[in-house]
Amino acid sequence: MEPARKSDTAATSMGSADLSDASTDAAAVISQDGAVVGWTRGAEALLGYSAPEMVGASAGRLLAEPEAPARVGGIAERCRAGNGWSGMIRVRHRDGRTLDVLLRVSAAFRMDGRECFLLSAREERGRWTMAQSVLDGFLARSPVGMAVLDRDLRYVWVNGTLEQLGGVPQEERLGRRLSELLPGLQGEALEKVMGKVLATGVPVTDYEYHGWSWADPHRRHAYSASFFPLVDTDDTVTGICYMVLDVTERWAARRILSMVNEAGTSIGTTLDVLRTAEELADFAVPRFADFVVVDLLEPVLGSETHEALLDDAGSAPARPALRRAAVRSVREGCPEAVYRVGDRVGFLGPPYDARTLIKGDPLFIPVLDADQDPWAASEPRRPDRIREFGFGIHSLISVPMRARNTALGLATFARTTNPAPFGSDDVLLARELVARAAVCLDNARRYTREHTAALTLQRSLLPPALTGGTALDVASSYLPADSAGGVGGDWFDVIPLSGARVGLVIGDVVGHGISAAASMGRLRTAVQTLADMELPPDELLAHLDDLVLRLGGEESFSGADARGTAAFTGATCLYAVYDPVTRRCTMARAGHPPPVVVPPDGPAYFPEIPAGPPLGLGGMAFEATEIELAEHSLFGLFTNGLIQACGDVERGMARLAEALARPEPDLEKLCGTAVRDLIPGPQPDDIALLLTRTHALGADHAVSWDIPDDPAAVGEIRTLAARQVTEWGLGELAVTTELLVSELVTNAIRYAAPPIRVRLLRDSRLTCEVADASSTAPRLRHARSTDEGGRGLFLVAQMSLRWGARYTGEGKIIWAEQKIPAEQRISAEYRIPDERETP
C-alpha cells in the first residue's frame, strides 16, 4: 500500500465533535474488506445510490481515480493505527458524473466482530473570486465612511462617503491631519484614540463622538467610529484605518429617552404649582435651551376649578389670562425676559390664539425673525429688547401645557448662545418634557385645591374660641401639616357641662385630606352630643367607638372606596371631665397619648391611664381613671404629631414636659412657645396642643344640704336656698331659686329614693342640683288643664336657662341653671367670658 499523500490532512483522533459533524453530511460505514455496512439518506442524496443498492456491495465502485485503491489502502492502514483522516477525494455519482468531496474517516472500530470505518463526506464548493475593480467600487461606494492614515495620522486615502460626511473634499484631506480639517469634531480626542491604536495594536470599535462638520454646520451630529491598525507581512504597523457611521438619529432618540427619564426624577418633586414650573425651566436650561419661560393660566395658579377654555358658546376667548410662573436663562438675570415672575403676560399674536392651548399643537419657529414672527408681534417691546441687547434669539419652540383634557399654560424654549436651531427631534423632546411637567402641574393644582378645601373645612369645624368658664383657663395651638403631608383630622374642644364642670376632648382621625377633615367634623359633633348626655368618659368613648364602626361599615357598603373617597378607617381620642368643686379629673383614652400634668409645686408627669384601643376596632372596653389636680395645675392634651417630630415618642414626651414646666404665667404664650420649640419647621402631620390651668370653687361658691325623706322639709329648704342666694348678692334670683328647689326636691321625695341632697353652685351661672339614690330618668310631661299635677319639670324648664340630669355611682342628679346678670357675676379673680346664650 502507498502511504497517504502529503496533501491529505491527518488528525490524531476523531473526537465526538467530528463524528457529530459527519452525521450531518453523507455518511456510511465500510468494513475492512471494502463492503458497505451502513448507508445514510445523506449519502443517497450526495451520490444517488439508495441503501438497498449499496449495503453489502463494494465501496470501490464509487471511486473515480485510477490510483484510488493504493491511496485507500494507505488511509486504512493509518486509521487502523488509531488516527483519523480527512482530505479531498474524487468519487463517481450514479449518473456518471464525478464529484470532488471532502472525506473524513474515523479510526478503526469493531462492529459485529468485524473491523469497520465511519466515513462522512460533503461536496467541495468552488470559491468565488472578486476582481480588483469590484473591490475598488465597493470601497468607494460603501455607505460607511472609510479612511487610511499613515503613522503620522495624515490622510493617505479617503472614500467618497467620508468626504460627504465631513464636507471636506478628498484632495484637501490628503496629507493633512483630522484636527486641522474639522476643529469642531473633537479632532484632538480622536487623534489620541488613533495614537493609542498605533501604539498597542489593539482595535477600538464603536467609539461615539459628537460635533459639527462642514457638511452640516448648523446641526450637531453624532458619529460612531472603529479604528484598527494596518500591518504588513512581518506584522509591522504601517498605518491605521478607520470607518465612520452617522448615528445622529440613534443618538437623538437615545438623548430624548435619557432626558425624558431624567426629567421624570427632576420635575414634580413637590406638590407645588410654582415650584413645578421652576423645575421644568431649571431642567431645560442649559441642556436643551438657552432661555425658557413658563406661563400658566391664572386659574391654575389659584384654587378655582378650571376644566376647559371653552365658553358657553363653544368658542375660545381671544386672549386668555396668563401669568409668568418661571423664567430661566443662561445669562445672569434673564435679560431676555420682557416679563418677570408673577406678571400678567400676553399671548402669541394671530393666527395663534387660545385655540393653540386647546389643540395642544406646538409652535415651531426654526429661524426666528424678531420683526415678523408672531412671538415678537404679540409684544411690541420684545423686538426692540432683542436688538438692543443683542440676545440673538434665533430659534423657538412654544408647547401648550395640557393634562387630562385641561389647558394649563404655555412653555416656551428659545436658543440664543447655541448657534444650532431647533430641529424636529427637538420639538419631539420639548413635547415630552412639557407633557411630563403638565401632569405634575395638574397633580399639584388638584392637590392644592383639595388641600385648601380640606384646610378650610377643618378650620371651620374647629372651635373659633375656647372658654373654660370659672373652672379652667384655656389656650390652644393648631398647626396644619405641610403641603407634602396633607391636612389631617386633628381636633380638640372644650365643652361646658353642668355643675361648673368642663369636658376636654382631643382626637386624631386616621388619614389626610377632605375625607379626614369631614370625619373629624362628624366625631366632634358626636362628642358634643354625647357630652351633653352627661356620659362618663369611658361610656362616651364606647358610644363613639360604635359610631366609628357604623360609619366605616356604611362607607364600605356604599362603595366609597370605588368613588375615590377613603373609607372611615378609625381615630384616636382622649376625653376628660374636670370638676372645679372637687378638683377631680376623670379621663379615658382610645389609643391616644396620655395628657401631661404640671403641678404648681412639682415636676411634670404623664398620668397612667389605660391606653384603650383606637376607635373603630370594636369589641374592647375602655377604662376611666380619676386623678386629683391641685389648684393652678397645668393640664395639657396633645396629638401625636407634637411628640413624633423628633422621631422618638419617649424623647418627644420628655421634651414636651420640659417645655411646659417653664414658669410662664401667660398660658397663650406658653402654648405657642412649646409648639415652636418642639416643631421648628414643616411637619408631615397636624399638630394640636390644648393647655388648661385649673381653678377650684371653694366653700364661698358652693353650699349643700341633706334633705330628710319628708314632704315637710320642702319649705325649710326653700327658705335656706333663698337666703343663700341673697347672701351671694343675687336677690333678684331668690324667688326663681325657691320655685326650682321646691319642684326638684318635691319630685325627689315623691318619686326617688333617699338619701336626697341639695347643692347650690355660683360661678358664671347659678346652678341648683338635687341628688337622690334613684336611677329612674325624669320625664317632662305636658299636663292637661284638668290634671292636678305633672307640671313640675315643665315649670323647671320654663324658669331655668337649661336643665338636665346626670347619673353617678350612687344614683342621679337633676340640675337647673339660671343666668346671672352681668353686673352681679363672680368677681374678677376668675376669668369669666361674655356669654351669649338665650333662654
Image (spheres, rainbow, N blue to C red):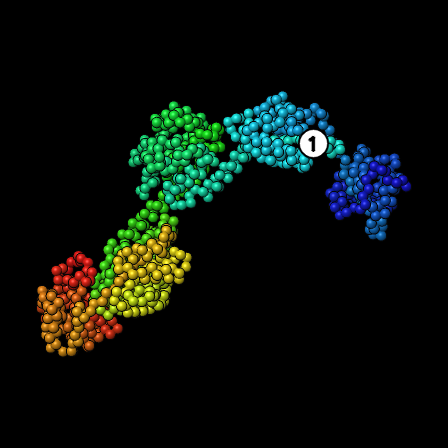
Position above or below: 766 against 73 = below
From the top left corner, tell me how far across and down residue 511 is, in percent. 37, 54
Q: Secondary structure at mark 1?
A: strand
- Identify which residue is drawn at 32% across, 47% down: 452
Tag 1: Cα neighbours inside 10 Å, few (<14), some, or many (≥20)? some
The quadrant of the image that shows the C terminus is bottom left
From the top left corner, tell me how far across and down residue 605 is, in percent. 34, 66
**Which quarter of the picture shows residue 45?**
top right
**Camera-side residue: 783 or 137?**
137
Position above or below: 34 against 220 = below
- Identify which residue is drawn at 79% across, 42% down: 104
From the top left corner, tell me how far across and down residue 477 is, in percent. 30, 55
Position above or below: 94 against 492 = above
**Which quarter of the picture shows residue 709?**
bottom left
User: What residue is shown with label 1?
Assistant: 230
**Camera-side residue: 702 or 48?**
702
- Identify which residue is drawn at 25% across, 54% down: 464
Q: Judge whether residue 745 can be spotted in this image.
A: yes
In the rendered view, does 434 fall on the left or right side of 234? left
**Camera-side residue: 799 or 583?**
583
Q: Residue furthest front?
A: 663
**Camera-side residue: 144 or 18?**
144
- Identify which residue is drawn at 62% across, 29% down: 144
Please name the amino acid that badge 1 sits on: Leu
Q: Judge whether residue 568 can be spotted in this image.
A: no
Position above or below: 366 against 552 = above
